Image (cartoon, rainbow, N blue to C red):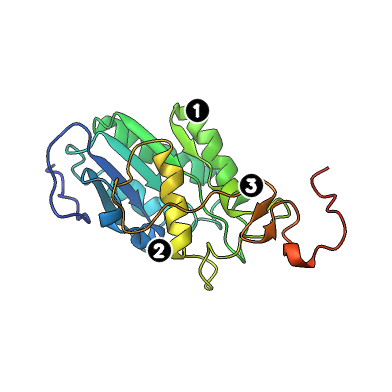
Amino acid sequence: MQKLKLKIRNNRIDRISANILIFGSSITKEIKATDLNDNVYFNTNRGALVSDLERKIQEIDLSPFSTIVLQFGGNDTKLSVQTFSRKYKNVIQSAKTNRIKTVIIWGCLQRSNTSLDHINNALYEISIEENVTFINHFDNFVFRNGEIVPGLIHTNGVHLTNSGTTKLIDNINKVTPIRNVNPSVQPYQTYDRNTWDSYCYNCGSKLSQIITFCFSWT
């Protein structure tokens, strides 16, 4: 069966060994191609479930790519962990069969009204079993009290703001180089471990409201 050509976001595609594909759900639509290197491409699947991508990855031509970053799972909260893990592993194995050299799993971002802990735990276990890299975004987007860091998640509780998207790129760039050296958005500022945008990193309270010593980190 002839493989389908993938619809991607970028100006052109060269058949070089360093091409990177970010393959995911609607979270990826917030990323601007101009902020990334020319060899980074996107395929966005809005509302996609692991079952959708399990089927799609078997049908598409991945030959132009050597690295794939998988970003999905946030829409599969109602699926059992066992079923989710089995289907996600099928996606990884299909990528490897398509001669993808490097597979990177993108951990799900926290949502304001839905816990994704069980999904992220499953993704981490999958990364170990399949010997692939796992990117944990949780520590950068969530305070130690479980509250989402203000300013990174859109008011809809799901999608990212510009600052959140930039932070996301920073996290991925630590694992595989994707950032354009002349991006349109500057990297998200790094703060001291105990503070973040005038909020206490440990308890999540505004620093201006903390009148006694915060014991949440002890």
Q: Position of residue 29 (x, y in %)?
A: 34, 61
> Which label sits on residue 159?
none
Residue receiving disc 3: 192
Q: Which amino acid type corresponds to the residue marked 2 in the rendered image?
A: Gly
Which of 10 and 37 lies nearest the eye of the viewer? 37
Q: Is residue 87 visible?
A: no
Residue receiving disc 1: 129
Residue receiving disc 2: 47
Which dot, 3 or 1, sits closer to the camera?
Answer: 3
Neighbor class of circle 2 (other Cα within 10 Å; few <14, some 14-19, many 20+) is some
Which of 116 and 141 lies nearest the eye of the viewer? 141
Q: Secondary structure at mark 1?
A: helix
Q: Give the residue at x 12% y 41%.
A: 14
User: Disc 3 versus disc 1: distance between alpha carbons?
Assistant: 34 Å
Q: Position of residue 33 (x, y in %)?
A: 27, 55
Quadrant containing the N terminus is top left
Q: Position of residue 49 (x, y in %)?
A: 42, 56
Quadrant containing the C terminus is top right
Q: Secondary structure at mark 3?
A: loop
Which of 48 and 134 lies nearest the eye of the viewer? 134
Extreme residue toward the bottom, this view: 155
Q: Which amino acid type corresponds to the residue marked 1 in the rendered image?
A: Glu
Q: Give the residue at x 81% y 50%.
A: 216
Neighbor class of circle 3 (other Cα within 10 Å; few <14, some 14-19, many 20+) is few
Q: Is residue 213 visible?
A: yes
- Tell me which numbered mark, 2 or 3, is placed earlier along the sequence: 2
Q: Secondary structure at mark 2?
A: loop
Task: Note whether 121 is above or below 208 in the view shown.
Answer: above
Which dot, 2 or 3, sits closer to the camera?
Answer: 3
Side (left or right) of 207 relative to 29? right
